[in-house]
Image (cartoon, rainbow, N blue to C red):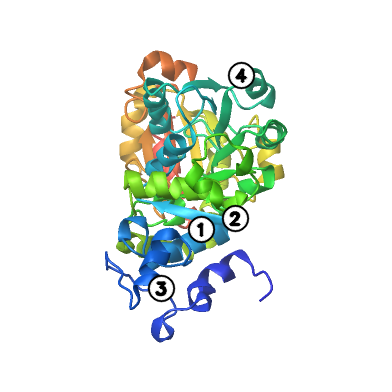
Amino acid sequence: MDKQGFTTSIVHGDRITGTEHGGVRQPIHTSVQYGFERVEDLIGVFQGTRKGGFNYARQGTPTTAALERRITSLEDGLGSICFGTGMAAITAIFLTLLRAGDHLVSSRYVFGNTNSLFGTLRTLGVEVTTVDAGDAENVKNALQPNTRMVFVETIANPGTQIPDLQGIGELCRERGIVYVVDNTITSPALFRPKAVGASLVVNSLTKTIAGHGAALGGAVTDTGLFDWSAYPNIADDYRRAPAKEQGLLQIRKKGLRDMGASLSSEQAHSIAMGAETLALRVKQSSDNALALARFLQGHEAIGKVFYPGLESHPQHGVAQALFKGASWLLSFELRDAERMAEVVNALRLPIKATGLGDTRTLIIPVAPTIFFEAGAETRKAMGISDGMLRLSVGIEDIEDLLADFEQALKLAA
Ligand SMILES: *Cc1c(COP(=O)(O)O)cnc(C)c1O
């Protein structure tokens, strides 16, 4: 069949690749063990000569494999591996592809737990340098002879900084460095990092890909652009595979199989159901976020508004050029930080909760919660003020959201 559109290929994917009894979606396979009539087939699955077989659920089930196909299709990649959480996916990349003595360059603006993971990498002998990746020159200046990998996020949380995605991609290609892009905030509905030369793409499936906030999951997708035959850290065992497949094979064996942060079939099924409406939800929540950002920008009680869809955003041009929308992540500052509790408590629709990419709007004050442990100095360096509020905008009707913010902000005016 011709290459189909984004949503068409998601909603028909399971049926076309085949299910039992004509089921339109892949069922939940709960079996841990997989048995064979002939012992040769069992051996073939172990040795990788019998493609598509299963032996033990820690390494995957037909249900997780169906979700992996779905993610691969969303990212237009070569293949994907699903994990129990987004952090497990990121950890598997770092621990299986980096060795003591290697160097990693990352954007300074990354998810808090990823930043905390850099501390662990340093204790294991991996050097980590963080830079302002808004300019590829800063990444270039940080490169060392032992730099093996560059890591960025598409839109940073909570400050919405966007790296020079294209420039860094060109730099990594020239130098033969693995380029890892965490696509969680944009999701493949707004942006495919393959377009800027990413080698590996990370998605926290927990967020907007599932969308319902009822399952945890993560995925790594290989775009097929990186030449693993020249990468020094691939174990001899995996060199026998075709060059393009070696990276993902090592992540699956050393990361998923050995480290064991597997996704269950139940969660995979739940995520796959959510993913069917990804493009529709992201469109609605991004449109809502833009309307809210415009409203907030003009409000007397509000200081800065952080949203890449606004012309005033420093990387507005990059967002316009690369993304189909500016996402559902929106932060803003109350001019009077002391009125924070009053205003947030007056909001009726947004749920006072952490979490991102839900169908419901979520709100959280940044400094006293997700960046509390970071301390005042780090917050200042990251541009996080005491009055900063982060919104994960949902798919509610925009009139209701605007009316709610209008009544709550009267208190702060
Ligand atoms: C939430 C998040 C993660 C981690 O995902 P979990 O599924 O919660 O482990 C990684 N990166 C980004 C950008 C995130 O927002």
Q: Secondary structure at mark 1?
A: helix
Q: CA distance from mark 2 to mark 3?
A: 21 Å
Q: Between 272 and 28, which is closer to the camera in this rendering?
A: 28
* Label 3: which secondary element: loop
Task: Give the residue type that dot 4 points to.
Answer: Ala
Mark carried by residue 71: 1
Q: Amino acid at mark 3?
A: Gln
Task: Report, in whole angstroms, how far the alpha carbon at label 4 lies from the one at label 2.
Answer: 29 Å
Using the rendered view, name the quadrant where residue 78 is placed. Answer: bottom right
Mark 2, other Cα within 10 Å: few <14 / some 14–19 / many ≥20: many
Q: What residue does disc 3 label?
A: 26
| CB contact under 8 Å: marks 2 and 1 | yes
Which x, y percent locates residue 154? 57, 39
Give the x, y percent position of residue 5.
Answer: 64, 67
Which badge, 1 or 3, comes first in the chain's sequence?
3
Which mark sits nearer the N-terminus, 2 or 1? 1
Q: CA distance from mark 4 to mark 3?
A: 46 Å
Give SS at disc 4. Answer: helix
Dot 3 beta carbon under 8 Å from ligand 1: no
Q: Is mark 2 within 8 Å of ligand 1?
A: no
**What quarter of the picture does the C terminus occupy?**
top left
Local packing at callout 3 (Cα closer than 10 Å; few below 14, some 14-19, many 20+) is many
Query: Is 406 rendered above or below residue 412?
Result: below
Q: Report which residue position mark 4 lands on.
A: 142
All told, the count of numbered labels is 4
